[in-house]
Image: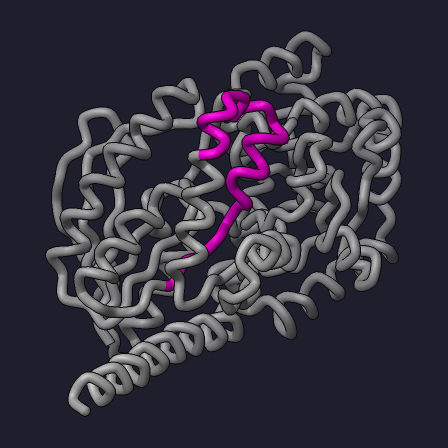
């Protein structure tokens, strides 16, 4: 099968960011499929080029982007990639066109290329648009809201099938387009990547004198408007009072990085009990999580964000580490049922600090939570397990498309 795979923010393990598309594409190549990824080089001064990642043909276009940009500049970046991707996708031979959001605008080149090539289009929903930006206040203009809503309906209406990263996202798609088949395939646990030798973890702890054998709470990922990592800083104040030995490490990047650092400094936490590192390549995260006592996943108190499927949630499972979250929804249900972590009160960061400090040295609880996290990684969220479901969607869409084309051809010949 020849697959055109459109992802505006594709990353490989040597880059900082989620590697879902890389992992899915390389497995498709290993199964004998040909995969062309169309993406962007978001760095200033980036170049238009073609590379190969484990057999994946990656087409890069220079479209600078960061979540520190204004919404207007981001929209211009979305539009620029939409035009470039449409031209490239239409020029490539394909049996199927696949596009993964966000942004929602990637659906346009996906749909157009699929129609030109007369092949199926499969759309992957990573965040519900326009619901999230509307709830966050980013889309206030009624005209913009109608355009975004129309674009979502356009994507779902033209998709042979939709892949949603959580049950809540699937429900949102179905509410708009009941006729479109929707399959839930969440983010995954990369078990082999996070299988870190104890000696590597020991060296990591020894190299950082502030850590040593102290408990470590980590946050890895974006520090953007949706994340609210200041919550962890406020929690760290209480942790310092409850147990001065507990350390917090925040690794990431984004619009709120500087403000979060300033907040930690204001409370005399920075480089004492709170440590902040700029983003690191995905390949460096396993040893950080291997050294962690507990990981965290945080969002602002906005209901639409409960349906997220954050990579950090599944990375913790892959590393066999408990995770603490401050939101409800399907992930909180999973943690309560499995015992693989904690659900913190989103309105009480101070109380969350006390809870985290209390569990950071509770060895019986930690042992049970680590075992539960590992079971979830193996039994429900293994990358290899979820890939089978992903490939089945693509194969089903192509087979259905061929049947329909043959039926149409037969009808026309009569």
Extreme residue toward the bottom, this view: 414
- Residue displayed at 62% across by 51% down: 313
Q: Position of residue 212 (x, y in %)?
A: 66, 37
- Residue 287 painted magenta: no
Q: Is residue 152 at all visible to an observer of this figure?
A: yes
Q: Position of residue 231 (x, y in %)?
A: 72, 26
Q: Position of residue 357 (x, y in %)?
A: 83, 36
398 lies left or right of 299? left
Q: Nearer the viewer, residue 203 or 106?
A: 106
Q: Nearer the viewer, residue 404 or 84?
A: 404
Region of the chain picked out in magenta, as a range: 122-146
Extreme residue toward the top, this view: 266
- Residue displayed at 50% across by 31% down: 145
Q: Is residue 24 above or below residue 207?
A: below
Which quadrant: the C terminus? bottom left
Extreme residue toward the front, this view: 414
- Residue 130 painted magenta: yes
Say which quarter of the image contains residue 78: top left
Which quadrant: the N terminus? bottom left
Q: Nearer the viewer, residue 223 or 412?
A: 412
127 lies left or right of 50? right
Q: Position of residue 24 (x, y in %)?
A: 39, 64
């Amino acid at each position: 099968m020849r697959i055109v795979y459109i992802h505006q923010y594709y990353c490989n393990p040597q880059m900082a960011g989620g590697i879902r598309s890389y992992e899915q594409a390389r497995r498709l190549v290993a199964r004998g499929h040909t995969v062309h990824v169309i993406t962007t080089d978001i760095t200033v001064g980036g170049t238009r080029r073609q590379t190969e990642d484990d057999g994946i043909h990656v087409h890069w276009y220079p479209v600078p982007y960061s979540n520190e940009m204004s919404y207007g500049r981001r929209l211009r970046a979305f539009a620029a990639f939409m035009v470039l991707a449409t031209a490239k996708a239409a020029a490539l031979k394909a049996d199927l066109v696949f596009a993964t959001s966000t942004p929602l605008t990637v659906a346009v080149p996906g749909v157009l290329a699929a129609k030109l090539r007369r092949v199926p289009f499969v759309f992957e929903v990573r965040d519900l648009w326009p619901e999230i930006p509307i709830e966050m206040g980013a889309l206030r203009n009624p005209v913009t809201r109608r355009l975004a809503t129309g674009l979502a309906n356009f994507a779902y209406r033209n998709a042979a099938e939709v892949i949603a990263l959580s049950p809540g996202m699937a429900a949102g798609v179905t509410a708009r387009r009941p006729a479109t088949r929707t399959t839930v395939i969440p983010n995954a646990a990369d078990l082999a990547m996070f299988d870190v030798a104890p000696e590597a973890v020991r060296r990591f702890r020894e190299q950082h004198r502030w850590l040593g054998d102290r408990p470590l709470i980590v946050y890895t990922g974006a520090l953007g408007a949706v994340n609210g990592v200041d919550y962890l800083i406020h929690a760290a104040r209480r942790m310092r009072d409850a147990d001065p030995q507990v350390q917090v490490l925040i690794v990431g990047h984004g619009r709120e990085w500087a403000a979060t650092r300033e907040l930690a400094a204001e409370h005399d936490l920075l480089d004492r009990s709170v440590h902040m590192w700029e983003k690191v390549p995905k390949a460096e995260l396993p040893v950080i999580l291997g050294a962690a006592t507990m990981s965290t996943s945080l969002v602002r108190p906005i209901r639409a964000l409960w349906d997220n499927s954050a990579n950090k949630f599944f990375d913790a499972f892959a590393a066999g580490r408990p995770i603490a979250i401050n939101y409800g929804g399907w992930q909180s249900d999973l943690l309560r049922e499995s015992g693989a972590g904690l659900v913190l009160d989103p309105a009480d960061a101070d109380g969350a600090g006390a809870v985290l400090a209390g569990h950071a040295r509770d060895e019986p609880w930690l042992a049970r939570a680590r075992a539960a996290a590992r079971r979830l990684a193996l039994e429900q969220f293994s990358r290899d397990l979820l890939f089978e479901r992903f490939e089945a969607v693509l194969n089903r869409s192509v087979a259905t498309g061929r049947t329909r084309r043959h039926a149409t051809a037969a009808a026309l010949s009569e």
